[in-house]
Image (cartoon, grey):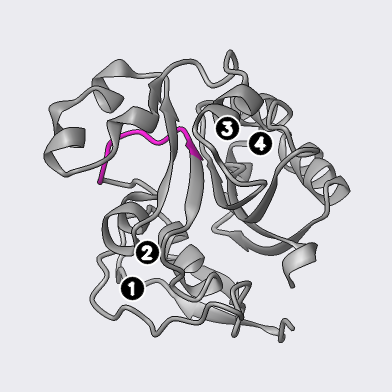
Amino acid sequence: MFTPPYVQPHPDPFYNSTLQFQNNTSLNQNNVNPPVMDLQYNSQLLQDKWVCQTLNYMKGGTYVDLGSAEPIKCNNTYVLESRLGWRGISVDIRPEDVHSPSWTEVGRDMSMVYAADALTLDYKKIFEKHNMPNVIDYLSMDLEPPLLTLEALYKIPFDDYKFRCITYETDAYREFDTVQPSRKFLESKGYKLVAAVNNQDDYWVHTDFL
C-alpha cells in the first residue's frame, strides 16, 4: 500500500527543485531484492532510480524506452540493462544516437534498438517479435517536442499490454497543453499518478500492482 508522499532532495546541489516520490512504493513485493548500493544513475530526473526503488531492484525485468537518445548519458534504462539484467526495446529517431559505436562498446543489446520515427512503428508487432510479456515492467516516454510524446502514447497497445510503471515527459513548463490529455488517457487505462516531477515528468504505476 502507498503511504503519504515525502520529498526527496535531488543529489545535485545545483538542482533547484525536489523530487516527490511515494515512500515504500513497491510493486514487486513477491520478488524482493536487497538495494544495489553502488548503482550509478544516469537519468536526468532520476527516473531510473525511481524505477529501481519502485520495483525493489528487480532483476531480469523488461522495458520499452521511446526517445532513448544516447546509450548512457541521460538514458533511463542503461542501469537497468547493464546492472540488473533487464532487456528491452529502445527507439530514437536520430541514427547517430542509436547506431553510435558507443552502444555496442558499452555492451547494450542492439537487436532491440530501433532508429525510427516512434510514430510510425507498430508496437504490438514489435512486442510480439521480441517476445515481450503482457506485463512489461517499465515504459519510458520522452520525445521531442511534447506533442509527439502524446501522439506516441496513443499508439501503445495498452489494451494488450500493461506496464508496472511509467515515466512520461510532459515538459509542462513549456505549455504545450499535453499534460491533461496524457493524464486523462493514462487514468482511463488504469494507471495512478504518483509524482509530478519538476514540472517536467509524470511518474505512474498501474493500479493492478498496488
Tell me the kind of residue under disc 1. Answer: Pro
Marks 4/1: CA distance?
A: 27 Å
Q: Nearer the viewer, mark 2 or mark 1?
A: 1
Amino acid type of the residue tagged 4 in the rendering = Glu
Amino acid type, label 3: Phe
Q: Is residue 17 visible?
A: no
The span from disc 3 to disc 2 (Cα, nearest Å) is 37 Å
Q: Secondary structure at mark 2?
A: loop
Q: Residues within 10 Å of mark 1 (few under 14, many from 20)?
A: few
Q: How many marks?
A: 4
Residue 67 inside the magenta-drawn segment: yes
Residue 173 pos. (x, y %): 59, 44
Can residue 52 be found in the magenta stretch?
no
Name the residue at 50% across, 76% down.
56
Mark closer to the observer (3, 2): 3
- C-alpha separation, residue under disc 3 versus residue under disc 1: 35 Å
Q: Select label 3 or label 4 by which is in front.
A: 3
> Callout 4: helix, strand or loop?
loop
Dot 2 corresponds to which residue? 15
Numbered tag placed on residue 127 in the rendering: 3
Q: Which residue is mark 4?
A: 175
Asked which secondary structure carries label 1, the reply is loop
Stretch in magenta: 65-72
Q: Which residue is mark 1?
A: 11
Task: Depth check: give the residue in front, 88 or 194.
Answer: 88
